[in-house]
Amino acid sequence: MGRAAVRQAMTNWLDGAIPSVTAVYSSTPKIIPGTQFEAGVPPGTMTSAVIVVHFRESFDHRIAMGGQKEVTHNVVLYVRVHSRQPDSEDAMADADAIYDDLIAYLRTNKQLGSPTTIFLAGEDPNGDLRITTDAMQSDRGSLWQFSTVEVSVKEIVTA
């Protein structure tokens, strides 16, 4: 299938699936407008996020004599959290809920809803899912956090 098909399948599967995630981008946009963090969330929602799907690396290895290869894409989900919570501890609790929802959703379907494109996701000997989180930063009355969720996504190709 290839990177474009895997990227689109992953973006489609995540889009609209995680509460408080207002957008899933298949590539880094030039600008993410501040209003995007409020789009589609219930009134009074204080913390929301956007996700960008990024392929860090891809590699393949032969798995059968018949010409099949397993292609592994190391995908990084860049998660940008924005909070208007007045207390940073409340903002962090909201952000943790977003990460927990995202990880739980990634665990629900090992083919990310696209069995003809994705053979297996979130299963890797070096760690199934890995989250790296920066500290909350304050900017003009809002709190921001940049995080990454790393997941391996595998496809089978004939080569």
Image (cartoon, helix red, strand yellow):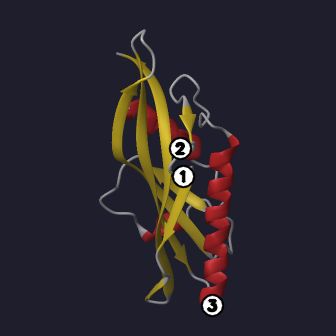
Question: At label 3, which amino acid type do we have?
Answer: Asp
In this view, 119 is above or below 126: above
Tag 1: residue type? Gly
Give the quadrant of the C terminus: top left
Q: Residues within 10 Å of mark 3 (few under 14, many from 20)?
A: few
Residue pictured at 47% horizontal, 28% vertical:
155
Q: Are marks 1 and 2 in contact (CB under 8 Å)?
A: yes
Residue occupying the point 61% across, 81% down: 91
Which residue matches tag 3? Answer: 87
Numbered disc 2: secondary structure: loop
Q: Nearer the viewer, residue 87 or 101?
A: 101
Tell whether 3 sits left or right of 82. Answer: left
Q: Position of residue 85 (x, y in %)?
A: 61, 84
Q: How far apart, in angstroms, are the residues tagged by discs 3 and 2? A: 37 Å
Please give the residue where the numbered disc 2 appears in the rendered image. 124
Q: Nearer the viewer, mark 3 or mark 2?
A: 2
Would you say 112 lies left or right of 70 here?
right
User: Residue flagged by tag 2: what amino acid is it?
Assistant: Asp
Q: Earlier in the sequence, mark 3 or mark 2?
A: 3
Tell me the element at label 3.
Answer: loop
Give the class, few, some or many, for how many residues have Cα within 10 Å of label 1's Cα (few <14, many ≥20): few
Q: Give the residue displayed 56% in from the left and 34% down from the top.
A: 120
